[in-house]
Image (cartoon, rainbow, N blue to C red):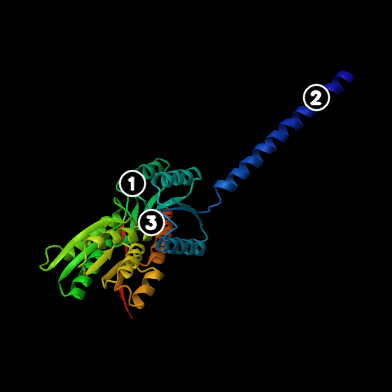
């Protein structure tokens, strides 16, 4: 009898242990489902730099759209460092974000990161600057070629189709620099009485725009106009020109607050407005469409306009 009672106790203990294991497994599964099956959307945004007002505004536009949609936006700042950007995108992939928005520091170097996201089956959308490889669902940007052309045509009209021109280029290898430069040269090259006497990179940076323009001014005293691929370089060039005491027409690109103020104050002639907040908002809204399985255009253009003194 005692043996039978002992056997029953052992059996009961085993049943209780197995029951507990089964309950634990069920709870773990529920937790996993809660983490991965809630339907929450997480959007990754890899931005080239937050040290530029244009990209800060772009990020703000994306954050606004994500908040309105109830999605989470995770932002990683590359600080204009290609290796850092690739590492940041790898982190987003590890976090298993739903979609990745990439504003490349370098259109060629970013290809490996795009391909890594492709392998992880995470859709990629490029923003403002394109990637020169990998599978990208869509590219969202202003028509940079047209913007460069608008700047060139404005300069020609302002100078009466006569004068020496200077071009301050953005970061080599970026689609924005390539396209803005192309549009500018489409407008001014081959025109009688007009000559581009200097075309040098200043990497979209204000301090470099200042130093490069100082060097150009030392060797050239007869400059009619400067076209900078972005406002930061234009504002740097403005400092150099003001210090030299010369009167030179300056046209930038982006319509940042500082540049628009400089235009309205008569210090800069014009800037091409890209509307970065709209680019960020459009990127997030398009990402949500992609995640719903909707078809989107391969290239989505955001409106441009030339800003001159009011």
Which residue is the site of mark 2?
A: 10
Quarter holding the C terminus? bottom left
| Residue drawn at x 25%, y 60% as measured from the top left | 216
Is residue 305 visible to the viewer in this orientation of the structure? no
C-alpha gap between disc 1 and disc 2? 61 Å
Disc nearer the start of the sequence (1/2): 2
Question: SS at mark 1?
Answer: loop
Asked whether the residues under the numbered discs 1 and 2 touch, taking CB atoms below 8 Å apart as contact, a structural biologist would say no
Mark 3 falls on what kind of element?
loop
Q: Nearer the viewer, mark 1 or mark 2?
A: 1
Mark 3 Cα shell of 10 Å, populated few (<14), some (14-19), many (≥20)? few
Q: Closer to the observer: label 1 or label 3?
A: 1
Residue 206 x %, y %: 37, 61
Residue sitting farthest toward the left? 192
Please say if the residues under marks 3 and 2 sit with CB atoms less than 8 Å apart: no
Q: Is residue 156 above or below residue 291?
A: below
- Horizontal relation, residue 93 to residue 265: left or right: right
Which residue does the image show at 46% across and 46% down from the upper left?
A: 88
Residue at which label 3 appears: 294
> Between tags 3 and 2, which lies in front?
3
Left or right: 40 as drawn, with respect to 281? right
| Residue on which the image places disc 1 | 135
Q: Residue furthest right?
A: 2
Image position, residue 245 (x, y; %): 29, 71
Q: Position of residue 211 (x, y in %)?
A: 33, 59
Whole-Å distance between the Cαs marked 3 and 2? 60 Å
Image quadrant containing the N terminus: top right
> Which one is in front, 201 or 223?
223
């Amino acid at each position: 009898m005692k043996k039978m009672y002992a056997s029953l106790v052992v059996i009961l203990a085993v049943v209780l242990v197995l029951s507990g294991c089964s309950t634990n497994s069920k709870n773990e599964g529920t937790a996993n489902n809660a983490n991965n099956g809630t339907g929450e959307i997480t959007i990754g945004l890899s931005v080239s730099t937050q040290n530029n007002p244009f990209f800060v505004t772009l990020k703000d536009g994306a954050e606004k759209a994500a908040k309105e949609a109830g999605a989470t936006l995770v932002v990683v700042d590359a600080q204009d460092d290609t290796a850092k950007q690739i590492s940041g995108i790898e982190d987003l992939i590890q976090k298993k974000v739903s979609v990745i928005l990439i504003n490349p520091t370098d259109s060629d170097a970013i290809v490996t990161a795009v391909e890594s996201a492709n392998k992880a089956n995470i859709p990629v959308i490029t923003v403002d600057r394109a990637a020169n490889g990998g599978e990208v669902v869509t590219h969202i940007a202003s028509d940079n070629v047209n913007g460069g052309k608008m700047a060139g045509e404005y300069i020609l009209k302002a100078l009466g189709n006569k004068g020496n021109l200077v071009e301050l280029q953005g970061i080599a290898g970026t689609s924005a620099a390539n396209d803005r430069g192309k549009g500018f040269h489409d407008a001014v090259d081959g025109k009688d009485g007009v000559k581009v006497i200097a075309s040098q990179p200043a990497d979209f940076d204000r301090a470099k725009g200042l130093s490069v323009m100082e060097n150009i001014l030392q060797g050239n005293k007869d400059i009619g106009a400067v076209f900078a691929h972005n406002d930061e370089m234009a504002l740097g060039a403005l400092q150099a020109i003001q210090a030299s005491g010369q009167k030179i027409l300056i046209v930038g690109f982006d319509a940042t607050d500082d540049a628009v103020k400089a235009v309205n104050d008569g210090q800069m002639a014009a800037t091409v407005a890209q509307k970065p907040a709209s680019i960020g908002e459009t990127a997030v809204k398009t990402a949500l469409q992609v995640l719903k399985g909707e078809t989107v255009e391969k290239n989505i253009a955001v409106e441009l306009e030339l800003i001159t003194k009011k």
